[in-house]
Image (spheres, grey):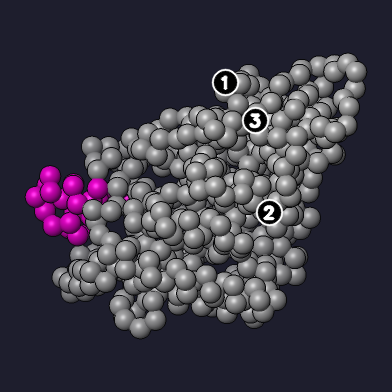
Amino acid sequence: MIWLKNGTIIDGTNQPSYTGTVCIENDRIKKIYDAQKPLPGSLEGDVIDCSGKIIAPGFIDAHSHHDFFAARNDNLPFFLPFIEQGVTTMIAGNCGFSAAGYDESTPHQNAVGGGLFSNRGNNYGSFKKWMKKADKLLPVNMASLVGHGTLRIGAAGKSPDGLSEETLQETLDILDRSLSEGAAGISYGLMYEPGQFASYEELKKFAEIVKKHGKTATFHARACSKVSTSYQPPIGGRPHNLRAMDEVLRLVRETDVKTVYSHLIFVGKKSWDTVDESLRLLEKINNEGHDVRFDMYAMEFGASVITVVLPPWYLKLSAKKRKNWFNRLRLRVEIWVSKKALGFGFKDILVTNTHGNKPEIEGKTIAEIAKEQKRSVLSTYLDIIENVDESASVLMYKYQNPAIIEKLRTHPLVHYMSDAWIEEGASVQNFAVYGNFIKFLELARDHGDSMEATIHRMSGKPAAYYGLKKRGTVDAGNHADLVVFDKENLSHNEEKQQRPKGIEHVYINGVHVVDRCKTKMNEINQKPGRFIPVD
């Protein structure tokens, strides 16, 4: 047995903390002793003095993409920085892309992941088959959504055409089966190919299946900025990020599907005045009786694919038509107008990974590369896209600012997440990989906020929302996913790819994977995580 003795227990329910001792036996919390109750006379096993430290549930990354690493034998490097932050569970399969949930006979297997992610030649297909394989290889716990984009790619690749009635029904059947097998819901990626090509009626049909199962739909909406190339004309009228939210909330009203609005961000300075209206819309729909949350990360930037700022009409074109002078002129005008109206430009796009195609430009912004090459930024940008086969990864800045982060992170509808992953071969990683959850804790500490509420948003709250039974709270009988941290010693470096400070112990299903700030590689190599099927 393991005894976490005399710590301040914050149990993940948003109730006041108390001093006590947690007893772990095998993979479960056996018993919790309040400081007012005497401990057994002799404590058998490993006794850890947690005096002056906080004992909390393991943190849940409520928006992850680690399903694409879950079934790999060599997956530990992708999970390790999250474990060292205290993350013990991930909700994966977001933004329309999941590693599984499609017909294995598809000729479009290599397109699964949409350019952001890849199954590296593995053809998982069936959600159940992939889930069983992942369960044996996971260093952390995981539940996963099925991506609408993955369903669509499996049926028709990245085609912009509408699905035939027969093909649509086949994909609906795959979703229905995957949800019965334990998928947590569906995710939409309406800013990415091929999700951006789907009709509203198609989106609604998938949501109705999810509602039937009582599960969750998450949405990467069509726009996260005041103006975008997702709408025509690309400027004017109602702010585009609010139009995008209107679309999602309309679907919620018509289907009553339980919904998470993914990574509520406000790209570009000119978008920052839409924060209050966005929150008002989310509050309003909840007041109407629907169940809608949003998730957020603690950073002012986010990761994406390099083509994300290109309009759908341009992405639909063949390589030859993209070089047509009129199409180039139209694109140039649209992007120039959007940049001016948005307060965001090519200086805010940092190339992080070209997958070996152009490593010399990694770690530089598009504007810096254009200056070096003495070319226009748009020509440089389009040339990069062509040379990297549209698959380069980027960090996008000016997604939000400290004031926005403060307003969002304390909102009653929020879940905390990272939306971050390790890029193989990348010169620059997303710094959220190393410090996102630590930053949430630091912000709460430094602003005098409730640590109980903060931990609730990264543990008990998402666990209950996604239906993760016996997870997310410090309670007898629950799985022993626990974190012990020193609140006063928490720190991270937002511009460095290095481990944060303050996380002293981490347990995943009772396995001690971080011990007094030292990572226990042998224990993690035993793959202590579990796949969590959602009923």
The dot on residue 105 is none
Horizontally, residue 501 falls left or right of residue 257, namely: left
Magenta span main SS? helix
Please provide percent x and percent y for residue 209.
Answer: 70, 69
The type of residue carrying mark 2 is Lys
Q: Which residue is mark 2?
A: 461
Name the quarter where the N terminus is drawn. top right
Q: Secondary structure at mark 3?
A: loop
Nearer the observer, 119 or 25: 25
List x then y, in percent, for residue 106.
56, 56
Residue topped by disc 1: 518
**How would you rate the neighbour count of disc 2 (Cα within 10 Å): few for under 14, some for 14-19, many for 20 or more?**
many
Specify the quadrant of the image occupied by residue 208: bottom right
**Is residue 381 part of the magenta span, yes or no?**
yes
Front residue of 292 and 69: 292
Question: What are the residue bounds of the magenta stretch?
Answer: 365-390
On screen, residue 237 versus residue 42, left or right, reads left
Determine whether the residue tagged by mark 2 lies in a helix, strand or loop.
helix
What residue does disc 3 label? 53
- Residue 392 in view (yes/no): yes
Q: Point out the image quarter for the C terminus.
A: bottom right
Residue 266 on image: x %, y %:
40, 63
Q: Quadrant of residue 486?
A: top right
Classed neighbour count for the residue bearing mark 1: other residues with Cα under 10 Å, few (<14), some (14–19), many (≥20)? few
Query: Of the residues tagged 3 and 2, which is closer to the observer?
Result: 3
The answer to whether 357 is drawn above or below residue 524 in the figure is: below
* Residue occupying the point 39% across, 76% down: 239
Figure label count: 3
Kindly state the secondary structure of the residue where label 1 is placed: strand
The amino acid type found where label 3 is placed reads Lys
Horizontally, is 189 left or right of 93 in the view? left
